[in-house]
Image (tube, helix red, strand yellow):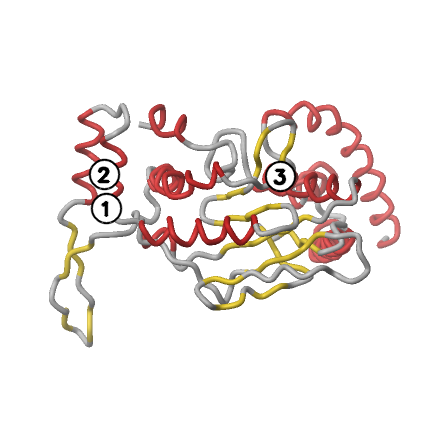
Amino acid sequence: MRKSIRPEISPKQFGFMPDKGTRNAIFTLSMLMERCIEMDKDLHLCCIDYCKAFDKVRHVELFLILEKLDIDGKDLRVIRNLYWDQTASVRIEGGHSDFKPIKRGVRQGCVMSPDLFNLYSEITLRNLDGITGLKINGENLNNLRYADDTVLKAEPGKQLQKLLDTVVLESEKMGLSLNVKKTQCMVISKKSSNPKCNLVSKGQTIKQVTKFKYLRYLITSDGRCTSEISKRIAMAKDTFQKMKPIIANRNISMTTKIKAYCGASEEPRGAFLAGKITDTRLEITQLSRRVLWRVSVVTL
């Protein structure tokens, strides 16, 4: 089934795709911001928040999309049997409510759910391709996605408003809705006074901020990563302090301490970083031994 679904997914989707992850999405967005700062160009962003996107997938529309793909009939029947004629009731004070049909939402914990949602959202956002965002090597980049976490990107002008209007329109056609209160916009700029974005959705003004978190990464309007680095250093210090009882324990072998120390650090994923990890592992081990030795000596 994945062989038929994944070719339909845009490269702009980083969620639940092979050799992609949050780091790739964060890196791509960071490089775009840095490049715009270098070229002294403002970058307009809009971080979209959907209202329970995975629970709003309509089964009828989902199967219409799947039927258009080259999916084996048996696989299609399996998916249909999982979702068709579902019913549910609510337990109330020892009793149960009447059973009601479930006609939307992908199953939580099911291995197929990420691919099904990616396909559903891909069809929803395909009409964005014709709207100008950023031109990089002749390619139009106007959005970046990790599952339902979507960032719209455009140069100064009315293109970001057009992108947002299209997203709202196409999403509502597929049963998805935006949470306007949690949707935020930002302008990445070198200017001392931050330019205005002035985004509106159905008469409601989109809140403009100077910083927001995307995939737990702190993005600031100056395009720099100073705040994120400071946050990561503080997190590393906190983790190291929590491990101090293990590291300073003379009854635990050095090998075990190094494994615990390296296990607390978060290594990059992805095939393109595998070689780098292998090359630097010996250096990390040697550095860890020196650090742990100093800690052990101090606690003697």
- Nearest the viewer among 8 and 200 is 200
Local SS, label 1: helix
Q: Of residues 246 and 54, which is closer to you in this image?
A: 54
**CB contact under 8 Å: marks 1 and 2:** yes
3D distance between C-alphas at marks 1 and 2: 6 Å
Nearer to the camera, 212 or 20: 212
Quadrant position of the N terminus in the picture: top left
Report crowding for label 2: few under 14, some 14 to 19, many 20 or more residues within 10 A (C-alpha).
some
Name which of mark 2 and mark 3 comes first in the sequence: 2
Residue at (46, 41) in percent of width and height: 128
Q: Which residue sits at x=37%, y=48%?
A: 170
The amino acid type of the residue labelled 1 equals: His
Q: Which label is found at residue 134?
A: 3
Classify mark 1: residues with Cα within 10 Å, few (<14), some (14-19) or many (20+). some
Q: Tag 3, which secondary structure?
A: strand
- Please state which amino acid type lies under the numbered disc 2: Phe
Question: Number of callouts in the render?
Answer: 3
Residue in front for this viewpoint, 212 or 253: 212
Q: Nearer the viewer, mark 3 or mark 1?
A: 3
Q: Which residue is mark 2?
A: 63
Q: Say if residue 278 shows up in the picture.
A: yes
| First-in-chain label (3 vs 1) | 1
Question: How far across and down, in percent of the image, does residue 207 sit?
Answer: 58, 66
Q: Is residue 87 above or below residue 143?
A: below
The picture places residue 190, in percent across and down from the top left corner, at 79, 52
Helix, strand or loop under label 2: helix
The numbered mark at residue 133 is: none
Q: Which disc number belongs to residue 59?
A: 1
Above or below residue 229? Residue 91 is: below
Q: Is residue 255 above or below residue 223?
A: above
